[in-house]
Image (cartoon, rainbow, N blue to C red):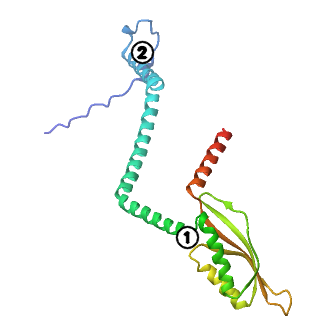
Amino acid sequence: MVKSLSSKPAAQIDFKRLADDFKGLDNDPGVWPLAPRVATLAFVLALVVGLAYWFVWQGQVETLEKSEKAELDLKDEWRNKKRQSVNLDAHLAQLAEIDRQFGALLRQLPNRAEMDSLLADINQAGIGRGLLFQLFKPGGENVKEFYAEMPIDVSLVGEYHDLGAFAGDVAKMPRIVTLNNLEILREKPDEPLRMKASAVTYRYLDEEELAAQAKAKAEAAKKRK
């Protein structure tokens, strides 16, 4: 005959006994019951951890977070520089091509000594098409960063196709010349057409002019300070 084994009753917390342990505690923790001593130890431990976090660890955590963010930023910067270094040859080739194109454009701008011949070329373009110049008046130069603009007020008289051919000749000039504010009119029925325009040509500044411009900018910056 097999006897059945009875299970032990589950341990139960005696809350009344715990409450009695916390009553009548004296000033000597060494003689306190176990429960008050454990509770006091847990409270002291939590207090120490809280004070350590507030006065020590909190600053260290903030420093750590800043350091982690700085690390991520440095990694991104490193990756960007790595990509740039990988494509360095392509960037240098692109820069050389830009310099070449800029030089080609710059060569289309006359220097100060060539302006007179360019004005003569514009005048000859009109005469070559049989047009009569009633006005050819160069204006004052408008100096920019590395070049200067010179507007020229022109007024020509001639046939429609000749005026159009003159505009085409000006556009085909090796030097850059633009025709702005173009106006073609016939003041009287029996008179030829009149074309009024502002021809704008450009020239690049020479070394002396660039140096003077840089000096003027430096002096203006000093005055602002």
Up-down relation of residue 82 to residue 47 (above or below): below
Front residue of 62/48: it is 62
Residue at 40% x, 9% y is 29
Find residue 53 and report its image quarter.
top left
Whole-Å distance between the Cαs marked 1 and 2?
103 Å
Comparing 50 with 91, the one in front is 91
- Secondary structure at badge 2 equals helix
Of the 4 image quadrants, the one containing the N terminus is top left
Closer to the camera, 124 or 155?
A: 124
Mark 2 belongs to which amino acid? Answer: Asp
> In which quadrant will I find the C terminus?
top right
**In the image, residue 2 lies at what x, y percent?**
14, 39
Reply above or below: 157 against 14: below
Circle 1 sits on which residue? 108
Q: Which mark is residue 21?
A: 2
Instruction: Point out the residue furthest to the right here.
Output: 188
Residue at left 39%, top 55%?
84
Q: Residues within 10 Å of mark 2 (few under 14, many from 20)?
A: some
Label located before the other in sequence (1 or 2): 2
Whole-percent x and y of residue 30?
36, 8
- Give the number of marks: 2
- Residue at image location 46% in from the left, 33% down from the top: 62
Question: Residue 189, how many percent across, how many down?
Answer: 85, 92
The image quadrant that residue 5 belongs to is top left
Q: Name the residue at the left extreme.
A: 1
Which amino acid, mark 1?
A: Gln
User: Residue 160 location, x and y as percent?
Assistant: 73, 90
Left or right: 20, with 219 as reference point:
left
Q: Quadrant of residue 8?
A: top left
